[in-house]
């Protein structure tokens, strides 16, 4: 039971962070500022952005190039600002969906860290396509 509460608290913290932010990592080396953010706060710092996108990669079992197109100038690099890949649009839609569900059904009540929330891992379980969780 205590492990479940710890897991729920951890998930709540992650989803809370995701609710504040919400995808499209776009770090440019020239000014180190994210570009083309449509869901995430425009002023998200690079460390928070990296932590968030690392969570996305883990939840879906993918790498950055799953959502981000290769740079036309240097195909060895990614163009994080590009909207070329369809999965980037899907990811934004998923963030909108989870944010809406969490706000409507899983409102955080002060002092109650065990309030459930959903996040990418809730359905994806480390897979590109959502998977049903199997009972142990």
Image (cartoon, helix red, strand yellow):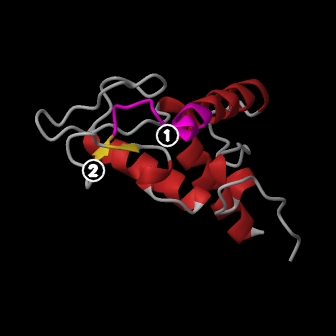
Side of 72 where 40 appears, left or right: right
Query: Which residue shows up at 12% across the image and 32% down it?
Result: 31
User: Residue 13: where, in percent of width, then height?
Assistant: 55, 47
> Looking at the image, which residue is at 79% across and 58% down?
131
Q: Residues within 10 Å of mark 2 (few under 14, many from 20)?
A: few
* Residue 30 against residue 122 in the figure, above or below: above
Q: Identify the mark nearer the N-term, 1 or 2.
A: 1
**Left or right, 82 with reference to 97:** left
- Residue under pointer 2: 75
Q: Position of residue 6 (x, y in %)?
A: 64, 63
The quadrant the C terminus occupies is bottom right
Question: Magenta segment, which residues?
Answer: 80-90
Q: Secondary structure under badge 1?
A: helix
Residue 42, above or below 89: above
Residue 46 position (above or below residue 9):
above
- How far apart marks 1 and 2 lie (CA) works out to 32 Å
The residue carrying pointer 1 sits among few (fewer than 14), some (14 to 19) or many (20 or more) residues within 10 Å by Cα, namely some
Q: Which residue is disc 1 drawn over?
A: 17
């Amino acid at each position: 039971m205590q492990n479940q509460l710890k897991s729920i608290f951890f998930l709540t913290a992650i989803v809370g962070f995701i609710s504040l932010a919400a995808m499209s990592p776009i770090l440019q080396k020239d000014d180190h500022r994210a570009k083309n953010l449509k869901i995430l706060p425009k002023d998200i710092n690079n460390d928070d952005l990296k932590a968030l996108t690392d969570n996305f990669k883990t939840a879906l079992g993918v790498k950055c190039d799953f959502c981000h197109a290769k740079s036309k100038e240097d195909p060895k690099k990614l163009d994080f600002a590009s909207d070329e890949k369809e999965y980037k649009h899907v990811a934004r839609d998923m963030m909108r969906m989870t944010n809406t569900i969490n706000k409507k059904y899983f409102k955080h009540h002060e002092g109650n860290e065990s309030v459930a929330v959903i996040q990418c891992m809730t359905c994806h379980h480390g897979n590109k396509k959502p998977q049903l969780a199997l009972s142990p």
